[in-house]
Amino acid sequence: MFDADVLVIGGGPTGLMLASELRLRGVRPLVLEKATAPSGHSRALGLHVRSIEVMDQRGLLDRFLARGQRYRVGGFFAGLGTTWPEDLDTAHSYVLGIPQNITEELLDEHARELGVELRRGRELVGLVQDAEGVTAELADGSRPRARWLVGCDGGRSTVRALAGIGFPGLPARHETLIAEVRIGVPWEEVLPVVAEVRRTQLRFGVLPLGDGLFRVVVPAAGLSEDRSAPTLGELRERLTAVAGTDFGVREPRWLSRFGDGTRQAERYRDGRVLLAGDAAHIHPPTGGQGLNLGVQDAFNLGWKLAAEVRGWAPDGLLDTYHSERHPAAAAVLDNTRAQMELMSEEPGARAVRRLLGELMELDGVNRHLIEKITAIDLRYDCAGEDEHPLVGRRLRDVPLKEGRLYETARSGRGILLDRTGTLSAEGWEDRVERVAGAGEPDVPAALLRPDGHVVWVGDDPAGLRERLERWFGAPSAA
């Protein structure tokens, strides 16, 4: 007897996105969240290009645009670069400034509209898996059971620990205090102080959040032993030491600290238990990639796990979640490490920073690093040596004869873009939608997975059938 098809542990952005992707495909998820209510604070402050595209592919982007602000400015890679690169390969060439609590609110709304059940105040304390499913042991004594369980429960993941999955990496060398507070001086007096301090200390900043609240970030005096939240007094002390003033900070809504350690789960799957988001990887927030990486984990995993539950997944499909997303996260860990080095006050690091700052004025360098930060450079290893360059990459939104590609993607099915008029996905109609291609991309036909990544380009029916079977399983009997 199963209480759900999938237990999702953690109701943050990753867990909510995953649950919605599962429910979209007829799978019954149950989200269990330890907190009794949303926290209301925001570690993350924005969505990058690939996450914006994901929201568009699910019909959510208008909601996000209404609550956020679009930016096309430089500085997203270690504060370097003065301009946003032109002609990025996307219909959404901007960063969307939107606090994490608003992102969670909108994803929660989307999940509930799809019929996702979210239970708060449910703390996981144990799990037992067998050949048929996973039983979760909760602190209240209940034992919900499902076919699968996914840990989306953050960097200190209980799921990861209970599953015995290693979490190797590099420990933190530096620590930073972060807070949402009110300040006691006019914003016009804060701005020149921030500008002066940031000439030499790039881990410092004050940012207005609206409603009289400000995000304050300042280097800590050293590494804390217990990682407990800092006090308002500690924040004031560090602000005075670094900036010469504490800005009259008061009424903290949230105080926290973060280090620059990087760790990654050895494997994203152990039997019927999987990991996503910060449960699978942690890194410094440089470049604003953390929330985005988790949402994109969920987007990759959702359709594959749903295929497994629904019984049509081809052999090895679910294993591609680890083989695709583990390298993607490893690349983020690398670039955040690099950014932290570039933000160091050491003379050697500052010399490298000056040199890279010159290189960032070259459009090709600027574009390369922004594509990396925004995840639109990602190419999954699902292509052969002689494959078309599009294979493995996500496809930007393009106009079709009727509507546009991302509108068609909202069904959650794969897409066969056919400009030849002769190809067919007969037998896979429940999993793949065939549409007449327009002017883009300039190929005879392309097969896209439900997450928008291209897995075949060409005009050969036999080649198409092979890829349909590889990614969408056997054709239906009908």
Image (cartoon, rainbow, N blue to C red):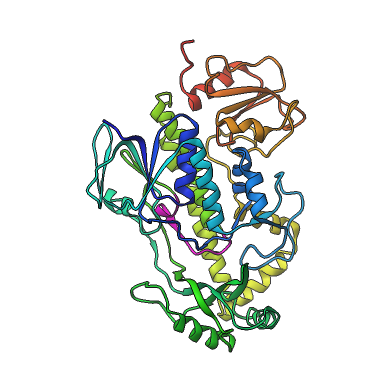
Say whether residue 430 is left or right of residue 28: right
Confirm whether the magenta stretch covers residue 37. no
Q: Nearer the viewer, residue 184 or 278?
A: 184
Q: Position of residue 105 (x, y in %)?
A: 53, 51
Q: Position of residue 223 (x, y in %)?
A: 40, 77
Q: Position of residue 473 (x, y in %)?
A: 46, 22
Q: Nearer the viewer, residue 204 or 378?
A: 204
Please state the total of marks drawn on the protein image.
0
Quarter location, residue 451: top right
Q: Nearer the viewer, residue 245 or 258?
A: 245
Quarter location, residue 263: bottom left
Confirm whether the magenta stretch covers residue 281. yes
Taking the spot 66% from the left edge, 83% from the top edge, the residue there is 193
Q: Mark yes or no: residue 406 visible.
A: yes
Taking the spot 61% from the left edge, 32% from the top edge, the residue there is 409
Q: Position of residue 168 (x, y in %)?
A: 36, 58
Taking the spot 67% from the left edge, 67% from the top edge, the residue there is 80
The N terminus lies in which quarter of the figure?
A: top left
Say whether residue 202 is left or right of residue 366: left
Spot the residue most to the top. Answer: 478
Q: Mark yes or no: residue 386 visible.
A: no
Quarter location, residue 353: bottom right
Say whether residue 151 is left or right of residue 298: left
Q: Nearer the viewer, residue 114 or 343?
A: 114
Instruction: Give the magenta-colored segment's residue range.
Output: 277-288
